[in-house]
Image (cartoon, helix red, strand yellow):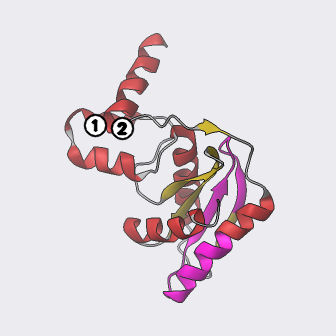
Amino acid sequence: MKYRLSFLFVCVTTVTFAQNLAYGPNITLADAKKVAAASEAYAVGKNWTTVIAIVDTGGNLVYLQRSDNTQIGSLDVAISKATTANNFKRPTKAFQDGLASGGENLRILSLPGGIAIEGGELLISGGKIIGAIGVSGLTAAQDTEVAKIGVAVIK
């Protein structure tokens, strides 16, 4: 087990610098709904269908919604993006970019519970992580675009 933990540390630090943010109180259901509503309104304005997942600081699902006709597979992907961003304290794009650069970063493929597709973003309030949002159903860049609209709701 000692070997595995050091291996995980190397993988994560190779991708990007470790976030020094602390976890704060969990996002409330009311705030999760506000985040999702802003993201959804943006997506609807572009005629995009999405799944939006919000998790708390423990990576537990707080809120989930799927637009009509969004592919079913995006449910699990959105949850995984939110959980990965929260649990590793960084946007999932950091892992996607790490894989794209290859070399030692290919170790990312071994991360337990991690997904290397952008669209997962941290939710930060008062300088602390309160949860994360994951969006799926579009291109990875569009998923991030929608997620960042929700992120902007939290101050």
Residue farthest along the top direction in this orientation: 2
Q: Picture coordinates of residue 26 (x, y %)?
A: 74, 46
Q: Which residues are magenta?
A: 36-63
Q: Is residue 144 magenta?
A: no
Q: Picture coordinates of residue 85 (x, y %)?
A: 52, 47
SS type, badge 1: helix
> Closest to the observer: 35 or 43?
35
Residue 2: which disc? none
Q: Quadrant of residue 57?
A: top right
> Closest to the observer: 95 or 151?
151
Q: Picture coordinates of residue 151 (x, y %)?
A: 57, 62
- Indicate the amino acid at tag 2: Ile
Q: Quadrant of residue 78?
A: bottom right
Q: Residues within 10 Å of mark 2 (few under 14, many from 20)?
A: many
Q: Residues within 10 Å of mark 1 (few under 14, many from 20)?
A: many
Left or right of 136? Residue 15 is: left
On screen, residue 44 above or below 147: below
Do labels 1 and 2 touch, CB within 8 Å? Answer: yes
| Quadrant for the C terminus in the image | bottom right
Q: Is residue 40 magenta?
A: yes
Seen at 28% across and 45% down, the residue is 99
- Indicate the amino acid at tag 1: Asn
User: Is residue 123 among what the camera can see?
Assistant: yes
Q: Which residue is mark 2?
A: 108
SS type, badge 2: helix
Q: Picture coordinates of residue 135 (x, y %)?
A: 53, 64
> Closest to the observer: 133 or 73?
133
Residue 105: which disc? 1
On screen, residue 63 above or below 84: below
Q: CA distance from mark 1 to mark 2?
A: 6 Å
User: Is residue 73 among what the camera can see?
Assistant: no
